[in-house]
Amino acid sequence: MEKNLESYPAQLTVEYSDKSDRFTVFFRLFMVIPILIVFGLLMGADHQPDSAAHVQYVGTAGVLFLPTLLMILFRRKYPRWWYDWNLQFTRFSNRIAAYLLLLRDEYPSTDEEQAVHVNFSYPDAKEDLHQFLPLVKWFLAIPHLIILAILWAVVVICTIIAWFAILFTGSYPRSLFDFVVGVMRWTLRVGAYAFLLVTDIYPAFSLHE
């Protein structure tokens, strides 16, 4: 069920900058706290973010998952405003993740796109989505989730290396940047398939677009 990645209905890109702000990078873990509080309030008091992976997407408390599943299952419908919420929330979470992972220096906006670009297509629930597949998508995504858990552990190591690199050189190593963005992109595709429920196309096992 794989499809050409260029046409996969969930895309993420992060603009690369060859200069990073050493001061904000040094204090990044403290500076991100206010926006994490806002993010935590949106997700709910019982689902506080505890990692960049959680912030980016794996934590699904902030998106409309179960209501969407039930609407597709019983009404063959994906309400447009639910899609709009899920899209904007996912964009917001990815801006925070990019900031926390030192990919960008701009403080995450609650509404402006900035340099982190996320998009996924609005589905025609009757034409594009199988009525009963949302019941098992989380199960079908388990191989991805296992691999992503390992990759996110590597991302933590890469971010620590990048932190030192930025402090000494003023720039984020491009190879590490591409890897981290690739893991974010992979995570988004899995999220779009298994939790956002905007596509039935099984995500590719790939870091690339």
Image (cartoon, rainbow, N blue to C red):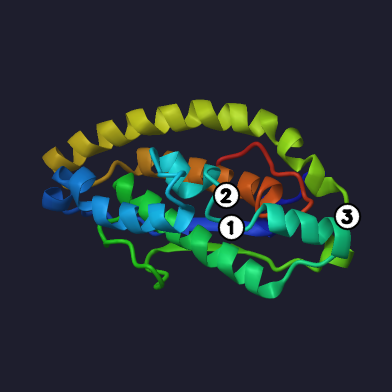
Q: Which residue is mark 3?
A: 131
- From the viewer's side, name the closer residue of 46 and 192: 46
- Count of number-bearing discs: 3
Q: Is residue 140 above or below residue 35?
A: above
In three-dimensional space, the C-alpha distance between marks 2 and 3, rounded to whole angstroms, equals 22 Å
Where is residue 9 drawn, in percent x and y? Answer: 68, 59
Residue 110 seen by the camera: yes
Residue located 18% across and 34% down the image:
164
Q: Which residue is mark 2?
A: 188
- From the viewer's side, name the closer residue of 14 and 28: 28
Q: Is residue 172 left or right of residue 80?
A: left
Residue 92 marker = none
Amino acid identity at mark 1: Gln
Secondary structure category for the residue under label 2: helix
- State which tag comes first along the sequence, 2 or 3: 3
Q: Are marks 2 and 1 in contact (CB under 8 Å)?
A: yes
Secondary structure category for the residue under label 1: strand
Residue 198 seen by the camera: no
Q: Which residue is mark 1?
A: 11
